[in-house]
Amino acid sequence: MVERRINLNLTLHAVILLLALMMLLPISVSGQEQQEQKWLTLDRTNYGFKIQYAAYPDLVIRERANSVIFQKLGNSSDIHDEVIISVNIIKKSKGNENNNNENNGNLNQFVNNLVNNIPSSYKVLEFEKNATLSGLPAYRLMIISLQGNKELGIFTSKESTIYSIGYSVAQSNDFDKFLPVAQKMIDSFQITKENK
C-alpha cells in the first residue's frame, strides 16, 4: 500500500511538472516571436535615406560604397540560409538635378536597360511600372532563375539619383517566407535629403 502511494505521488509530480513545462513553452515561443518582430531604423545621412529593419539576432549590416546590405545568415550561419536585402544608390548624374523630366528619363532608361539585359537563365515574373518607393514613382521587377530562385528589385529616382532595393534568398523556398519582412522594409524606406 505504501509503495502504491509512492508510485501515485511520483506519477502525480511528473504530471504536474509536465503541465508546468507545457505552460511555460508557449510563453518562450511568444517571446521569441516578439523579439523577431522588433524593428529598428537605420538612418544614414551620408546616403540620404532611412529604412526600418527587423532586428534579427543573426542579422549583419554591411556598408559598402553607395550601398547598405542587410544579410540574415540563419541560425546556423550557413550561407544556404541567407536572406539579403540591399539598398543601393546606383547612379547620380551631374546637371539637371531639378528637372523632373530628366529625372524620370534617367530612371526609365536605367530600368529599360536592366530589363533588356536580364540573362537568358532568368525570366520576368512581374514588371510593374506604377509602383511607389518613398512616395515617388517606381518600377518593381521580379525575376526567377531556371533553378527557381526569385529576386525582387524596386527602383525610383530623386534629384538625378537612382535608388534601388533588392531582395533575394539563397533557398528558393524561403522567398515567400521572408517577403513580408522585405516588403515592410521597402514600405518604410524614405529618402531624407536632396542629393546634389
Image (cartoon, rainbow, N blue to C red):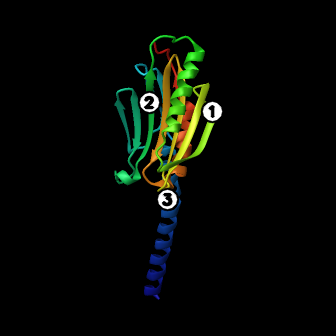
Residues under labels 1 and 2: Cα distance? 18 Å
For the point 51% across and 28% down, the residue is: 110
Q: What residue occupies the far right of the structure in this picture?
A: 130
Residue 196 in the image, given as x and y percentages of width and height: 45, 12
Q: Residues within 10 Å of mark 1 (few under 14, many from 20)?
A: some
Q: What residue would you read off at disc 1?
A: 131
Is there CB contact under 8 Å for labels 1 and 2?
no
Mark closer to the chain start, 1 or 2: 2
Q: Residues within 10 Å of mark 3 (few under 14, many from 20)?
A: few
For the point 45% across and 54% down, the residue is: 171
Residue 117 in the image, given as x and y percentages of width and height: 48, 39
Mark closer to the chain start, 3 or 2: 3
Give the amino acid at mark 3.
Answer: Leu
In front here: 182 or 167? Answer: 167
Mark drawn on residue 88: 2
Mark closer to the chain start, 1 or 3: 3
Residues under labels 3 and 2: Cα distance? 41 Å
Q: Secondary structure at mark 1?
A: strand
Give the amino acid at mark 2.
Answer: Asn
Mark drawn on residue 167: none
Mark drawn on residue 25: 3
Residue 186 in the image, given as x and y percentages of width and height: 54, 34
In front here: 87 or 1? Answer: 87
Give the amino acid at mark 1.
Answer: Ala
